Image (tube, helix red, strand yellow):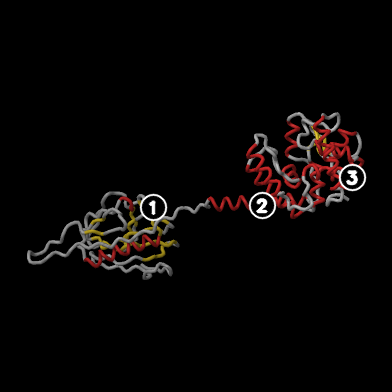
Amino acid sequence: MGGNDEDNGLSAGAIYDTDSTNAQSISFVRAEGSVEFVCAALGLGFHEARPPKLLRSHFVLRDLDTGEEMAIEQDSFHGPEGRRLALILPIQDAYVLGRKSYTRETLKSVLSAALKAYRDAKYNPDHAWTEISGSIRFVHPKPVETHDDVVPEPVLQAEPVSNPPVKPKRRLPILKWLAMTAGALVAFSLVQVCVYRFVPVPVTILMIERLTQGNGLDHRWVGASDISDNLKSAVIAAEDAKFCTHDGFDYDAIKKAEAYNATHKKKRGASTISQQTAKNVFLWPSRSWTRKGFEVWYTFLIEHLWTKDRIMEVYLNSVEWGPGVYGAESASQYWFHHSARTLSPAEASKLAAILPDPDKWKATGSGHYVSKRSGSIQARARSASDGCAVE
C-alpha cells in the first residue's frame, strides 16, 4: 500500500510493520481516486485504545490486510493480536477539533511529533490517547513493569506544537473608509464644477426648498451678454468690491467681520461673490461649519476652474431676488417689467440693494433704508464700471 504526494513534506508512502508496538509514519496515499491522510499504521496488539472524542468524527480505521474500513464511533474498540490497522484522515482544508481549528499542515506536524514520541519511547501496546491540548499526545497510561533494580523509563511525550493563531478577517480600517469617501466627494465635486463651467445651472437646492414652502419658482437663465453691465457693476459695489482681484476670499473683510461679531449681537458676514456662488449653486442654505467647509472647497474650485466672467454670470442667474424669483432676467421682469439687458443704473442699484434680504426688502416702492442704500451703491458702482466682469 503506498502512493506519493509531492508537497506533504514527508516520505512518500506509508511503511507498515507487523511488530505490534510499531507506529511508523504519516504520509499521503491514493485510494479510489482520492487522496487520504494516513496518520499512523498501528499493530493492533492492544485491547482498549481510546481515541479522543474530538477526533472520532474525522478518523476512520482501515485494516491494512483486508482493506476494511471502520468508523470510530464508540469510546473504545477491540481487535485481535497482530491485526494491522491504520488511522485514516480524509483530506480537508481545515479540521475543527473542539474550539481549535487546525490546517492540514499544522495537524500533520502535530501528529508527526506524537507518533515519533510513541515510536522512540517503545511504549507497550496498552497505550491510550489523551485529549488535545496544544498537540496530540500518545501517553503511556501506566509504567512498564520492571525489576526493582531497574529504574523505569520516564514517560515521554511529544513536545507541544504551537498552533498558528487564527487570523481574524481583515476589515478595512476606518481611516481607509474615510479616505475613500473623501476621494469620492472630491471626484464628484470636480465633475460638478467642470460641467457647470459650460452648462447653465437648471435648479439649486434653495430653489427647491423655497418651492416646497409655496414661494413658486421663476428662473430664467440668460447669457452674460444679455445682462446689463449696470447690474454687474452694482452687485460688485454692493457685495464684493475686491471681486476682480481676490482669489475667492477677502481676508481683510473676514478680519473686520470677526472683530465686529466679537462685540455685537447681530452678526456681519464677509462672503465674497465667489463664496455666494459656491453656496447657491452647489450647497444647501442652512448655516453650519460643515456647509462652510464645503463652501471653501467649492470656492477654491470655481476660482481655479472658472473665469471671473463665468462666476459673475452664474451668480447673477442663480441668486434670489424676491419670493420665488431667481436670476437677473426674472428679477428685472418681476420688479421693472422689462429685460435685464436694459436695466438702468438706478434700477440695477435697487436690485443690488435688496440682495441681503430679498424676502423682506423691495426693489420698487421701497422704504427709506433701501432707497438710501441703493443711492450709495449707485455712487460706488461708477468706479467699478471698468471691472473684470463688465464688458
Q: Nearer the viewer, residue 49 or 107?
A: 107
Between marks 1 and 2, how big is the CA–CA gap? 47 Å
Name the mark on residue 226: 3
**Residue 173 in the figure: left or right of residue 103:** right
The extreme left residue here reads: 148
Q: Amino acid at mark 1?
A: Val
Point out residue 276 in the picture as x, y percentages from the top left corner. 74, 43
Between marks 2 and 3, how big is the CA–CA gap? 33 Å
- Contact flag, marks 1 and 3 (Cβ < 8 Å): no
Name the mark on residue 186: 2
* Mark 1 Cα-neighbour bin, 10 Å: few <14, some 14–19, many ≥20: few
Q: Nearer the viewer, residue 12 or 107?
A: 107
Mark 1 = which residue?
96
Point out residue 94 in the picture as x, y percentages from the top left corner. 42, 56
The first of marks 2 and 3 along the sequence is 2
* 257 relative to 122, above or below: above
Give the label, 2 or 3, closer to the camera. Answer: 3
Q: Nearer the viewer, residue 212 or 229?
A: 229
Q: Amino acid at mark 2?
A: Val
* 369 relative to 181, above or below: above
For image coordinates 72% across by 52% down, the residue present is 301
Q: Which quarter of the figure has residue 292?
A: top right
Secondary structure of the residue carrying numbered label 2:
helix
